[in-house]
Image: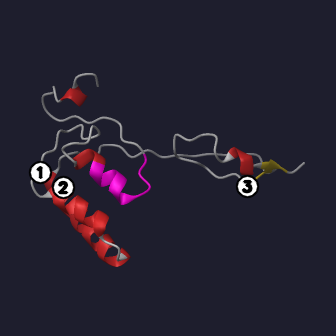
Amino acid sequence: MATTIQGKFEGMTTGPFGVAWDPDDALYGPYAPEDPRNRGHVNDAKLPALIKEQRRLKDVDARKKLIFEIQRYIADQQYYVCLTTPMYTGSWQPFVKNHAANPTFDYGSRVPALWLER
């Protein structure tokens, strides 16, 4: 990890990616040449323009269509190869109410809405 993020690696490698709730989070960081989350040092001539264009679109259907096009393009290029998919499971007692699993790194924000029925 210490040298990979600096671009010092042979072969294929990747680092951890955070959870992305908006497609732009998943597209911009790993693929924009100037972003520090671009761990693969991707410098594609076509991709930054597409990513910036999807940011400007106000029509939801048009943006969705462009994002699917970007995803297909990225899949063809194979800049990152995802080998694993995380799975989250959770359980709680029946008297714990208003709780939901939270697959992010924010472990405390849902607690104020939680209550116990006893």
Would you say residue 67 is visible in this rendering? no
- Determine the residue located farthest toward the top in the rendered image: 2
Query: Helix, strand or loop at disc 2?
Result: helix
Query: Helix, strand or loop at disc 1?
Result: loop
Q: Nearer the viewer, mark 2 or mark 1?
A: 2
Is 77 on the left or on the right of 38, as rendered?
Answer: left
In-front residue for pair 39/72: 39
Residue 100 appears at what percent x and percent y? Answer: 65, 52
Give me the C-alpha separation between circle 2 and circle 1: 7 Å
Q: Which residues are magenta?
A: 19-28
**Circle 2 sits on which residue?**
48
Q: Residue at x 20, y 27 (%)?
A: 6
Whether label 2 touches label 1, CB < 8 Å: yes
Residue 7 vs 54, above or below: the answer is: above
Amino acid bearing label 3: Asn
Q: Main secondary structure of the magenta part?
A: helix
Magenta span contains residue 93: no
Q: Earlier in the sequence, mark 3 or mark 2?
A: 2
In-front residue for pair 35/107: 35
Give me the C-alpha separation between circle 3 and circle 2: 41 Å
**Circle 3 sits on which residue?**
98
Q: Residue at x 29, y 25 (%)?
A: 1
Dot 3 alpha-carbon crowd within 10 angstroms: few under 14, some 14 to 19, many 20 or more: few
Rendered image quadrant of residue 8? top left
Q: Residue at x 24, y 41 (%)?
A: 38
Amino acid bearing label 1: Asp
Dot 2 alpha-carbon crowd within 10 angstroms: few under 14, some 14 to 19, many 20 or more: some
Magenta span contains residue 25: yes
Task: Kindly identify which numbered label has been placed on residue 44.
Answer: 1
Q: Residue at x 37, y 75 (%)?
A: 60
